[in-house]
Each structure stands twice: as structure tokens, then as C-alpha cells.
Image: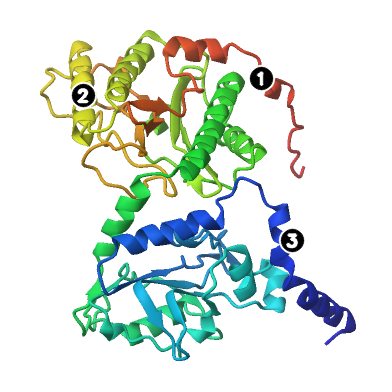
Amino acid sequence: MKPILQKILILICLTSSGFFMSYGQNKPDDLLKPDFHAGRREALRAAMPDNSVAVFFANPVRNRSNDVDFLYHQDPDLYYLTGYKEPHAVLLIFKENQQDPTGNLYNELFFVQEKNPMAEMWTGIRLGIEGVQQTLKIQNAYNGSAFKNYQINFGSFDEVMFYDFKNDVRDNIRDEADLYSLIEQFKSKVNYKNISNGLTPEPQKNNLDFTTLNSIMNDLRGIKTPEEIDLIRKAVFISAIGQVEVMKAMKPGLSEAEIQGIHEFVFKKYGSEYEGYPSIVGAGYNGCILHYQENAKPEINSEEMVLMDLGAEYHGYTADVTRTIPVDGKFSPEEKAIYDLVYKAQEEAIQQCKPGTPFGQLTSIAKNIINQGLADLGIIKSPSDRHLYFPHGLSHHLGLDVHDKGNYDRLETGMVITIEPGIYIPKGSDCDPKWWNIAVRIEDDILITEDGFENLSAFAPRKSEEIEKTMAQPSPLDRFVLPDIKGNK
């Protein structure tokens, strides 16, 4: 080994073991605390059936190209329960206390990625056992390599609860504690087998439960704690600010990618680690593509509208805010007619948001208003006509996932949901061509309170008149001019 490399490795070995103690000093002060995660584990344990164990695996590492991986993002359930952000880990939560061979009692086990100074040179410092114990306050932590031989009699439980496997995890044959190995070791421990086609699970014991855990996590994650609401509120406000800044900066000739970049710059400016989902910026016809993600149109013209569906992810929690604006700052009569109809449907649905309201009632309100409005405009013949101008649902839960876990019976205090009606009229639709390529979605993030609701994204204007007024304001980006790219002659 070269002397300089040896010195580097020695330095890492000396410092990385203590890194977790100083690591927190470089983190934001509004991250979820270990007490939150411990409380969520206790809430899960309280909801579990008697004599059961719940098993959670980390998300897999996904390869982007050759030896480069996508930026790692933890499984939301595992993060919710631990705060752990690293790959190659498995968490076990037991309903009742268990006893190890030395007589010690435990009700949870966490097998994590082992510290490795050489690997940490390339991919960053790992918490390791000590870091998990001292930073995350999870005392029963072990290296992942210990899982293979750890004695757990899974056959003694009435229910072994976990999410069934998708068989999409890569095997690092040099690592017996990678996620692939942990899953295979677990399958062996619980006598899980796949039939020959590799698709249908065939457990040899009848205590393997693939459904109950999801139901419990829906109940837990669907109702947000005050700590979660605080982070969601910040994520949504950051996203609303991005919408406002783009309204001010919008002008003909911008590309969809530039608009995306302005939004995401605002996200990063406020400390957002990621986007909550692939950003959607669709101009003209592209707005009619519900999950348009290319954002590749090089130049937007003044006759178009832009549908912008973006959300910042802030400390694990994501926003989901959509605004649709005219590129030239003024809605045409046809654009305004469609926009105001969507706004009316959204506003009526939002006003009904309160504990006890059925999710289906909100959808019916919005669809009835849109159907009647489309008929009044002559786009459809009758409010009862079937059409695809409003093809998606009105609402979903919001939290650690953009389509978060939660139940869809009735609204409850502490839920955070979206209200997002839309109308999309692509070219060639069976209506007057003057409506073609008009696409409008308005989406806001709504907290259900004890006596009603709070619109967390209200900072971003929704009314057509307010949008036009905001777009008339100057933007600091008006003075941001870059030189042209000069290619080879």
C-alpha cells in the first residue's frame, strides 16, 4: 500500500468512529428527533397482533449507469421508524419482549450497514453500530453480517408480517450482508419459497402475513403527528414560493427545463434535499400528459399555458403543489373559462374538508361542477356524458411519499391530503378546436384540523386574477443573463 493511502486510511479509521458525534452539529436543527421514531415504533407495536413480529427492509440501491448509482433514498417506512438513511439494513419489531441466549430482554433488533473505512472514502461516512446507538438511540443494533447466524425462531410466532418481495434487488456477491443477502437469509429463516416461475410466493408455514403490516402502517402514517406537520408545512411553503417566483419570471421563450430549474433552485435555497417526485412542467399539449416528465420543450410560445406540478422534499416529507399559468401573463377567454371552472371545482371541494367528510363526497362535488361547466361551455353535450377531460382522482394522502399511506374512508384530524381537479383537452378532442391543447390542474395541500381545514399552499395564488397580478411583478431573474454557447466552427 502506498504511504499516502495508508495515512488516509489511518486518518479515516481514527475519525470516522467518532464522526457520528459531530455529524449532528452539521445537520439542520429541525430534523425529526430519535424520540419521534421511538414513539412510532411503540405505536406500531401497540397495533400489532399478539405474538407477532414485523420486518422492514431498507430500500435497494439502484444502478444509474455502470459503476454509478442513483442518489439513495430510504424506504419511507424504515425511515419513519428509525431515522436511518443508509442501505443494506433490516429492522425487526416484536409485539412482546424476547429473550436472547444470555437472558437479556429485547423487543426490537436492527441490523445495519457495517463501518468500512475504505468504502466510506468513496460513498460517505456510515453510522455503524455505535452511530445507530448514540445518534438514533436504537440500542439493539448489530452489523448486518450478524443477521445470518442470529437465532430467531420465526416459527414460534402466530404472524410474521412483512411486505412481499419483488425480486428486483441486485446481488453483490462480495458482500454477505448486502440487502440481497439479508433478504435471502430471512427467506431461509422463515421457510419462504418461490415456485419455479419465481413469481408467486409459496410459504411453507402459514404464519407469513403479507397484508396486515400495510394496513397498520396506513393507519399510523395517514394521521400526522405535530412534528410531521411542521416538516410538511415547510415543504409545502417552499414549493409555493417556487410557484410564485416562476410566475414572476415567466416569459415567452423560456424552456420547460428552465422553468423546472427555477423551481428546484428555490427548493435547494431553502435546504430541501430532494424533489418529492419527478418535476412536471408541461406547456401547451404537454400539459395534457398527466405525468409528463421530459420537460424538454426548448421554447414556450406566448399563446400557451404551462402546467407546473412540483414538490420539494424537506427532511423526508414532500409537498405536491400545482399551478397553471399563461406564458404571456394574461389568460385568453378560453383559458380563463377552463381555469375558472377548475378553480370553482377545487374551491367547493376544499370548503367541504373537515373531519367526517367521506373522500368520495369531495370527488363527487368536483366532478359534478366540472361536468356541468363543460356542458355549459359546449365541450360536452350533457353533464351526464362520459368523457376523459377529468380522468384522474381528486385527492391523495401526502407525507413521506407523495402518494402517502393512509385510509380513504373519511377525513380525520391530522390528515394531509391534496385537492387537485383538472381539465385536459388535447388536440383532436371532440369539441370546438378553440379549446384544444388547454390543460389546467390546480393542486393544493390541505391539513385537516379539528374543525375544518388549513390550506398549506395558499401562499401561491390560485385565482386567475391573482395569478395575472403576480405575473406582472418584476423578477430578480430578469437580470440573470448567461452567454451563448459557442460550438466548434
**Residue 38 shown left or right of residue 114 in the figure:** left
Badge nearest the viewer, 2 or 3: 3
- Secondary element under disc 1, as helix, strand or loop, is loop
Quadrant housing residue 435: top left
Task: Tell me which numbered mark, 2 or 3, is placed earlier along the sequence.
Answer: 3
- Residue 389: give x, y in percent of width and height: 25, 28
**Residue lying farthest to the right in this orientation:** 3
Q: As shown in the figure, which amino acid type bears the numbered disc 1?
A: Ser
Q: As shown in the figure, which amino acid type bears the numbered disc 3?
A: Ser
**Residue 40 shown left or right of residue 136 in the figure:** left
The residue at which mark 1 appears reads as 475
Task: Tell me which numbered mark, 1 or 2, is placed earlier along the sequence.
Answer: 2
Query: Which numbered circle lies on residue 222?
Result: none
Dot 2: within a 10 Å radius of its alpha carbon, few (fewer than 14), some, or many (20 or more) residues? Answer: some
Q: Residue at x 57, y 58 (%)?
A: 71
Q: Is residue 332 visible in the rendered structure shown here?
A: yes
- Secondary element under disc 3, as helix, strand or loop, is helix
Which quadrant holds the N terminus?
Answer: bottom right
Task: Tell me which numbered mark, 1 or 3, is placed earlier along the sequence.
Answer: 3
Q: What separation in Å lies between label 2 and label 3 (alpha carbons)?
A: 53 Å
> Which of 412 and 188 lies nearest the eye of the viewer?
412
Q: How is the image coloured?
A: rainbow
- Residue 289: give x, y in percent of width and height: 36, 36
Q: Residue at x 29, y 28 (%)?
A: 354
Q: Please say if 128 is above or below 251.
A: below
Query: Which numbered circle lies on residue 22?
Result: 3
Q: Residue at x 57, y 63 (%)?
A: 136
